[in-house]
Image (cartoon, rainbow, N blue to C red):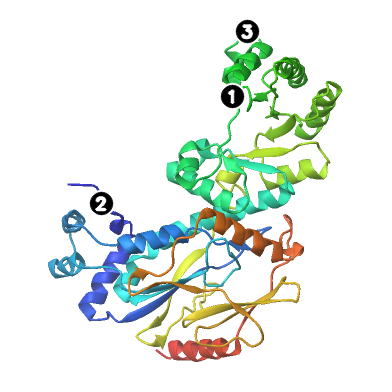
Amino acid sequence: MDAPSPALFVDLYELTMAQAYWHSGRTGEATFSLFIRSHPRNRAYWVCAGLQDVLRRVGEFRPTRDDLEALRGLGGFDPGFLDYLKGLRFTGSLRAMPEGSIFFANEPALEVTAPIIEAQLLETYLINCLNLQTVMATKASRVVHAAGGRTVVDFAARRAHGTEAADRLARASYAVGYSGTSNVAAGIRHGIPTFGTMAHSFVTCFESEAEAFRAYAASFPDTSVFLVDTYDTLGGVRAAVTVAREMREAGRALRAIRLDSGDLAGLSAAARGLLDDAGLHEVDIFASGGLDEFGVESIVRAGAPVDGFGVGTRVGVSADSPWSECVYKLVEYDGSPVLKLSAGKASLPGRKQVYRLRDEDGRCVRDTVALADEPCSGAGEPLLEEVARDGVVTVPSPPLSAIRARFSREFASLPSPHKALLSPTQYDVRVSGRLEALRSRAARKAANT
């Protein structure tokens, strides 16, 4: 038997609910909203990412014969229900915020409208996909902001949580402004520039740092970056200066040195002095080693002469906030609004739209979560767009460059207090009067059932 298809990437309760829906005849049209309930500490926005994978999945959603045999082997499923699944395809519609969009807690980033079994069976994948990539993109965007225009490169592949996570991280981080990735496969797959220097093992393989640097420069005469902290960092810089002078005499140029440990701000200043004293003003200084937005911001604030950063582990796993309360809630069934009233987990009923109000300079002022058919008062910009109808994707997949450009515009329009790395100001998100009234009616109805 072949491995399960992507259609079985579901929590078991999705399938048990689906069978119970089928048995009870509740197969009407439903709408689910996907949103994130809150912001973690020191966060005030999210960056939408992962929609491309979502659209690919809904287009390919179809259980295989082997899938159905595997479910039969689990026991507990009605043979008639498994026969029903045999012909199941996604026939619904999706409305979503485009990748690269900025959004906020309790705003739907995606709404799915489809027969309830189809919509329910997508839940696990949609949360997994959008949660992971949104968390990654948001963390990476903070690093770009902290770097203040300096180069940032993704170094996280080796400690990301699996090869797929490393691939998604490279794509998400480039979308929010990284210059490239060390991950060759992701670079080729997504058209992202790739960067690499050398490891300490390369240096220790030679009799001296200078010998290691000469060997590397002979192989890469126009793109060499020397790692200088294997033994004594400033001694390594002096060895780099010696080889860089030799390269210059041969008509070549050292591109940069890399610092990977110690007091990166202080060492970069000392290294800059040694390079400049040798007339090597064109050689950049690249810093790495346990950095995230907080480490990067500290180095920048110190005025350190660092031209670029390699960021890995802490960003790759979003160390300070590795998860979100991303949820997928039923908001309408068979034309009637529904909601959840659980303490701390209440949801908004009905199909929705999010409107963004901007000032005359294009800066974000506030968002309003409204009903999907509700016109926005004022000049609000609708954020949810149709991306699939009747099971067919209705928008072309934008190139990564377009997603990158969208994020750049959106982030520039977000006022600075909401971008602060520590204790940011929370953005103003309101609920429209009509949606509030619907919530009250639906809550009263639910309380009386």
Badge 2 amino acid? Pro
Q: Position of residue 407 (x, y in %)?
A: 61, 60
Indicate the secondary structure of the residue bearing disc 3.
Answer: loop
Q: Residue at x 25, y 73 (%)?
A: 20
Q: Which residue is mark 1?
A: 199
Cα distance in 3D space between marks 2 and 3: 52 Å
* Mark closer to the observer (2, 3): 3
Q: Residues within 10 Å of mark 3 (few under 14, many from 20)?
A: few
Quick check: 206 above or below 38?
Answer: above
- Lower sequence index among marks 3 and 1: 1
The amino acid beneath tag 3 is: Glu
Give the mark, 1 or 2, whose residue is nearer the N terminus.
Answer: 2
- Outermost top residue: 207
Left or right, residue 5 beside residue 263:
left
> Is the C-beta separation of discs 1 and 2 under 8 Å?
no
Residue 371 in the image, given as x and y percentages of width and height: 52, 84
Kind of residue sitting beneath label 1: Ala
* Residue visible at 68% across and 76% down in the picture: 366
Question: Dot 1: few (<14), some (14–19), or many (≥20) neighbours within 10 Å?
Answer: few
Q: Which residue is mark 2?
A: 4
Q: Position of residue 257 (x, y in %)?
A: 70, 27
User: x, y (%) of residue 66?
Assistant: 18, 53
* Quadrant housing residue 124: bottom left
Q: Which mark is residue 207?
A: 3
Q: Using the image as rendered, state which of residue 263 and residue 51 is in the foreground.
A: 51
**Relative to 295, does residue 281 appear above or below in the rendering?**
above
Image quarter where the C terminus lies is bottom left
Closer to the camera, 211 or 90?
Answer: 211
